[in-house]
Image (cartoon, grey):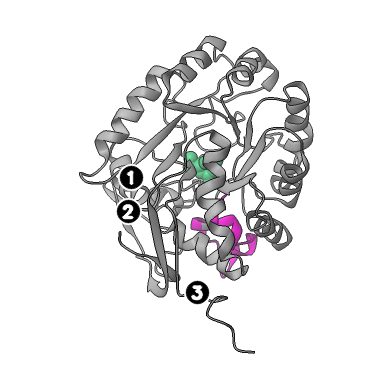
Amino acid sequence: MTPSATSFPQEISITRPDDWHLHLRDGAALASVLPHTAAQFARAIVMPNLKPPVTTTEQAGAYRQRILAALPAGMRFEPLMTLYLTNNTPPDEIRRAKDSGFIHAVKLYPAGATTNSDAGVTDLRLCYKTLEVMQEVGLPFLVHGEVTDPEIDLFDREAVFIERVLQPLRKDMPELKVVFEHITTSEAAAYVTQASGPIAATITAHHLLYNRNEIFKGGIRPHYYCLPVLKRESHRLALVQAATSGNPRFFLGTDSAPHAKGVKENACGCAGCYTALHAMELYTQAFDQAGALDKLEAFASFNGPAFYNLPRNTGRISLKREDWTLPAELPFVDSSIVPLNGGETIHWKMLAE
Ligand code: DOR
Ligand code: ZN
């Protein structure tokens, strides 16, 4: 049977998308990466794991100004700021954050779970007064959903987090809006699908496209190392199913996390995949492979704003089915960054506006 033109469109056009989970860093690094995101997305939820972390409304306001100042002339982009939760975040800080109008969420890094998480939370029960205010004012709680217990196998940390942390929290605070960030397992996809109350999840492009074999193909490949780490194929398939299901609880979050080449290609390499340059191409490829291009727009452009109570974007973007080679390296501060798929052929290309 000849495939019809409708099942293999050569070009797609969707409402301009947003990135609901992004690392922009600061200073010269910020200036290197921001144009990539601003070319693809109208807005992004900006992660607060700077050194030192963004823990107050005042710091978030100053960081927001630095982001806007780093935006090249003529580009439009709205940073949606977040606070980094610590054991000592006062409940009043949540009210200040909500009143600011520019802070849209608070992020949980379990202490020791990932990059710059040392100041993170050691026991969520220490934060209950603060979380209660978030529940009251409707400020979403973004969770890096992994336990840090060294007894738990690295590949099981997300599933154990659901049992040990997420279920008890949501039982105690059923109205707290929660985003289970960068989910990587069938357990997380099933939990978010079945749970009651205000919960959603972001899914990265790399977790939709790759399983853990990719990290070890022909040798150790550090640019495929991120946290939570890629999982086995059955989990990837569950994530693709969730993302393409049309369920509004799932939306786009790249978790693009720039690190200089030298700290990735290292005896103790940093976690993070850089996808800001070509995120929409990768998501389109993943949805295309699943025969679900018609589900991309809701995942990328509708479900996120609905959860965050923000308007949809009004502009549009287009992508064309076209092979092109991604640069092997990109300029980054005084060194370079190796994007995910650097030097490889990509099958979709975003068209200039
Ligand atoms: O791979 C990751 N990189 N996972 C995270 O949770 C943090 C991020 C980063 O900031 O580099
Ligand atoms: Zn992240």
Q: How crowded is mark 2: few (under 14 residues within 10 Å), some or many (20 or more)?
A: some
Give coordinates of residue 250: x percent, y percent. 62, 47
For the residue labelled by badge 2, is the local secondary structure a helix, a strand or a loop?
A: strand
- Mark 2 and 1 residues: CB-CB less than 8 Å, in contact? no
- The residue shown at (76%, 35%) is 196
Residue type of the residue flagged with mark 2 = Ser
Labels 3 and 2: the sequence-earlier one: 3
Identify the mark at residue 34; answer none if there is no mark. 1
The magenta-colored residue range is: 203-223
Task: Report the quarter where the C terminus lies.
Answer: bottom left
Foreground: 339 or 270?
A: 339
Identify the mark at residue 53; answer none if there is no mark. none
Depicted 141 relative to depicted 194: above or below? above
Asked if residue 220 is among those painted magenta in the image, a careful observer would answer yes
For the residue labelled by badge 3, is the local secondary structure a helix, a strand or a loop?
A: loop
Q: Distance between the residues labelled 3 and 1?
A: 30 Å
Identify the mark at residue 336; answer none if there is no mark. 2
Residue topped by disc 3: 9
Q: Distance between the residues labelled 3 and 2?
A: 35 Å
